[in-house]
Amino acid sequence: MADSSETKPVTAPIVDDAPSNDAGEGSSDTKQESHSDRKRKRFQDDGLKFGRGGKKRDMGRNAWSREQPDRRSRNDEEKKKPRPENSVLPAPFAQDEIAAEERKPKRKVAVLIGYSGTGYKGMQINTTEKTIEGDLFTAFVQAGAISKANADDPKKSALVRCARTDKGVHAAGNMISLKLIVEDPDIVQKINSHLSPQIRVWGIERTIGSFSCYQVCDSRWYEYLIPSHAFLPPHPSSWMARNLEEAADETGDREGYESRQAEVKDFWKTVEERDIKPIVDSLDDDIRDMVLQAIHEPSDFNPDGEQQDKQEDQVKQTADLNTSAPADADSKPEAAAETAANTDTPMPDQPATLESTNIPTEQKKRIEVAVRQLKTAYNAARRAFRIPEERIARVQAALDSYVGTRNYHNFTIQKTARDPSAKRNIKSFVCNPQPIIINGTEWLSLKVHGQSFMMHQIRKMVGMVALTVRCGTPIERIVEAQGDLKYSIPKVPGLGLLLERPVFDSYNEIQAVKHDKEKLDFGKYEKELEEFKQREIYQRIFAEEERDNTFHLFFNQIDNYKERHFLYLTSKGIEATKGAGKLDEQRAVKSKNDGADAMEMQ
């Protein structure tokens, strides 16, 4: 939500600070001026206050705008800039075409839209990338809703989005506001005819002239779909599982840890005995150990370490891990490691490490077949999991930790605990107690209603809840992560996230009534919206997860990442993360030294 507070700039008379000629050039009586002296002479601000410490505060948004060139000048400047050669926006029309076009009035409108984000680089327009707004703007031009004179620049139409969505994120209901030519009663159908089935315009409503869907929006509803097997505990052979067990014993929390995993404590034991052991027993002796290593220790399977380095780099992207500073519990938040599993590309779930070993080709093939067979068995077991009611209740208890106004500096990027904008209000966060089963996989629906959200915030909130539940972590850890210390919170895949709808109650109750405008309500299009959501959003999510195992790969990365960044999930809490990043620093030094040795040998 836009910050409404503004600080008006304080102007002071400018005094000429050129040297006086009274003493003569080079006179020994002339005192050498310091930088601070010159600054004080230039700005006569005696008696003026600029906030704490006498520093001049930043001017507000409106004050800054008044200092900028007018809109016509800005447009002229934009025209002078070279157009990208590979721009995805419509090419400028010839001057004779523009002159021949009939001039029609533009009206400020709200465009209610829905879309599947698969294959798009997010919502926000980008001249060189395929985006939702880019396709919409092109369709507006082709349908005649934007004149040829304004077709070369979305800024001329005052385009504003209600909510920006990231790469691959969907929206059943979103909104943009801009100036369009809407005299044609069939304009919505014409626009949709120029769009792919992934993007739909639900309706166009006339608004007041000053309307901005971003500033007027009261709140937003999001939904996150997640398979229930994401709440299974880490496999006992994983690095995370071993640390969870050790920390529980060392802190005397064994009973508490087991009580938090009681409803799923025998899951992996049953799977190993029922589904995995028969396959392992049938393997040849010469490949059995290597197959098990490839399944349970993917990071270490390559003796050259190349696959391990590649996977760790992917986790750092997933986690925004900045290993230049250790994420110690007593370090300053500003200097702590930036974290949160942030990659959108899961690490490969295949025995690619076999490529660099000296194993005979025939043996490699047998190993690959066995690994695929075991992975198929594990995937089938995960998809057959049905989450107990006690586990759902624990998920809901974790989600309740977000309700209210709290500090989310750990749930986004480039924010500190002292940043006022890191505080956000969550009205509700609810897990549907009735899971749905699609193609044999059970899914949970998590719906969050909040005033506004920061980049990656919802995905990190869901990530923290999933890790807390699956690792048997005390739920209080979520509240601790809303404090001053820095936590490494992974963001779950964007695959499951969708913007359900924005809310405009204040506008509907006041401005729309006062100016006799239609209310902005997605409920008018409920039938079309639900059909679109099922066909273009839900089915894409389910199909992509079934094909790529996106959620399993994501959590497998976290479970097998052999650094301390995520060990706050253990019974030791944030203290367990002390020294995080030191192993990365040692590897960096070793890599640098190896490179130097290679140069000397050359």
Image (spheres, rainbow, N blue to C red):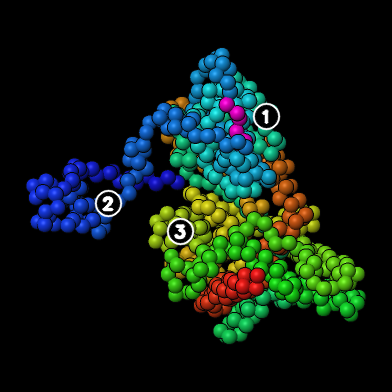
- Tell me the crowding category of disc 1: few under 14, some 14 to 19, or many 20 or more residues within 10 angstroms, Cα based: some
* Picture layout, residue 160 above or below residue 324: above
Q: Residue at x 81, y 76 (%)?
A: 290
Q: Residue at x 53, y 26 (%)?
A: 150
Q: Is residue 158 left or right of residue 398?
A: left
Q: CA distance from mark 2 to mark 1?
A: 51 Å
The answer, for residue 196, to whether it is visible in the render is yes
In the image, the segment drawn in magenta is: 87-92
Q: Is residue 61 left or right of residue 572?
A: left
Residue 537 location (% of width, % of height): 69, 45
Please state which amino acid type lies under the numbered disc 2: Lys
The answer, for residue 567, to whether it is visible in the render is no
Give the SS element for disc 2: loop
**CB under 8 Å between callouts 2 and 3?**
no
Q: CA distance from mark 2 to mark 3?
A: 22 Å
**CB under 8 Å between callouts 2 and 1?**
no
Q: Residue at label 3?
A: 415
Earlier residue among tags 2 and 1: 2
Residue 293 location (% of width, % of height): 77, 75
Quarter holding residue 116: top right
Please state which amino acid type lies under the numbered disc 3: Lys
Majority SS type along the magenta span: loop
Give the SS element for disc 3: loop
Q: Residue at label 1?
A: 194
Residue 279 location (% of width, % of height): 88, 73
Q: Residue at label 2?
A: 56
Quarter holding residue 342: bottom right
Disc marking residue 369: none
Comparing 89 with 304, the one in front is 304
Please state which amino acid type lies under the numbered disc 1: His
Q: Is residue 176 left or right of residue 438?
A: left
Callout in the foreground (2, 1): 2
